[in-house]
Amino acid sequence: MHWLSFLFIGLIAGWLAGRMMKGEGFGFFGDIVVGVIGSFVGGFLFRSLGIYTSGGWIGSLITATLGAVVFLYVLHLIKRA
């Protein structure tokens, strides 16, 4: 059940990040991939900065969404170079 919730949060976070950065999502599987990568990026960044979110859906969603936005921004910078 843990994996299902992880994928569900990844889907929502990827969709939100896609809407914020590009104006639309990346499709079902693309949103999941972006959100899951974003959760790892967000978790790493938050731990590095000493920021800890409460354990729960909302904290996980915020972390994954912000990580996905950073991930997409870095990809955009690489693509432009």
Image (cartoon, rainbow, N blue to C red):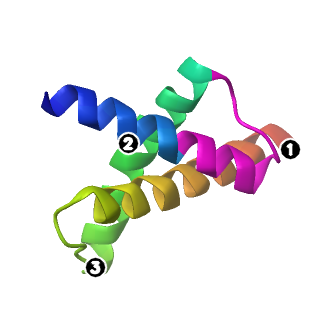
How packed mark 3 is, by other alpha carbons closer than 10 Å (few <14, some 14-19, many 20 or more), is few
Q: Amino acid at mark 3?
A: Ile
Q: Is residue 44 visible?
A: no
Q: Nearer the viewer, mark 1 or mark 3?
A: 3
Q: Amino acid at mark 1?
A: Arg
Q: Is residue 66 visible?
A: yes
- From which residue to which does the magenta span run? 14-27
Q: Is residue 31 left or right of residue 2?
A: right
Residue 52 at x, y = what percent?
A: 22, 75
Q: Which residue is mark 3?
A: 51
Spatial CA distance of label 1 from label 3 is 31 Å
Q: Residue 63: name its quadrant.
A: bottom left
Q: Which residue is found at the position 41% from the left and 53% from the top?
A: 64
Q: Residue 60: name its quadrant.
A: bottom left
Residue 58 at x, y = what percent?
A: 33, 63
Seen as rendered, the residue at the extreme top is 29
Q: Which residue is mark 2?
A: 9
Give the numbered dot on residue 80: 1
